Amino acid sequence: DIVMTQSPDSLAVSLGERATINCKSSQSVLKNSDNNNYLAWYQQKPGQPPKMLIFWASTRQSGVPDRFSGSGSGTDFTLTISSLQAEDVAVYYCQQYYSAPITFGQGTRLEIK
Amino acid sequence: EVQMVESGGGLVQPGGSLRLSCAVSGPTFSSYWMNWVRQAPGKGLEWVANINGDGSEKYYVDSVKGRLTISRDNAENSVYLQMNSLRVEDAAVYYCVGGRGWKLDLWGRGTLVTVSS
């Protein structure tokens, strides 16, 4: 199984400042056949189901604000929120869909400082 | 807009059974991989199982193999999770999730399964 490890577990950032969440996979999720990283990011607000933000490591889902961006390749990935807004308070998860079983990181709780 | 609506959750004793259902609106149901993802209270996300568009491929997390079974009925636009030999550690909100490939694009609001004597 591919183990996904996020850092930090929790993060407090001031409004308007940059937030960065890291995700590391125990093996590469880059598929050579199509040169895609099988890595997605999700946002979960309290009392709501998760919402996909980013897929293929860096492609924003339709309707997701452009302050959210994803980067990285192979085993190391980053979700960046360029200018934190109050509505971004949530738990963020990375997920690999390279191989079964699909696995998630443990989550990073993002709060306002 | 495609929507997923789960049902069938509830309280069950350890060793008991439940069948979760997920009704999917929209004309393209048979093109989606369908998944069940669970979340224990206050915990993170755990993928449970998925099934491809025609039901010919199924995958499970090891902890549920032999006890939980995913299936689908494309004529009814529905996906199911038959849960047998339930354990305390199976207690969670179970989300029905659809996607193109294994990306988890479309989430239901979940149904709560409680396993307790």
Image: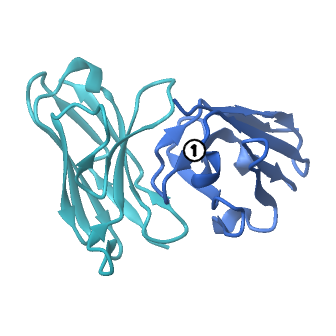
Chain colours: A cyan, B blue
Is residue A92 or residue A59 the one in the foreground? A59
Is residue B79 visible in the rendered structure shown here?
yes
| Location of residue A37 by image quarter | bottom left
Residue drawn at the location 45% of the way across and 54% of the way down: B103
Looking at the picture, how far across and down is residue B83, in whole percent?
Answer: 82, 51
Q: How many marks?
A: 1
Residue drawn at the location 81% of the way across and 34% of the way down: B8
- Residue placed farthest to the bottom in the image? A32
- Residue placed farthest to the front in the image? B27
Is residue B39 visible in the rendered structure shown here?
no
- Residue placed farthest to the left in the image? A17
Q: Along the horizontal axis of the image, is B105 left or right of B87? A: left
Residue annotated with mark 1: B97
Q: Along the horizontal axis of the image, is B24 left or right of A55? A: right
The chain letter for the residue carrying disc 1 is B
Judge the density around disc 1: few (<14), some (14-19), many (≥20) Cα neighbours within 10 Å.
Answer: many
Is residue A99 or residue B55 the one in the foreground? B55
| Location of residue A64 by image quarter | top left
Looking at the picture, how far across and down is residue A18, in whole percent?
Answer: 10, 35
- Residue placed farthest to the top in the image? A86
| B58, above or below A59, in the image | below
Instruction: Kindly state the secondary structure of the residue where label 1 is placed.
Output: strand
Residue drawn at the location 25% of the way across and 72% of the way down: A74
Quadrant of the rendering where the C terminus of chain B is positioned: top right
Looking at the picture, how far across and down is residue B44, in whole percent?
Answer: 49, 45
Residue drawn at the location 56% of the way across and 52% of the way down: B46
Identity, as a three-letter code, of the amino acid under mark 1: Val
Looking at the picture, how far across and down is residue B48, in whole percent?
Answer: 63, 56
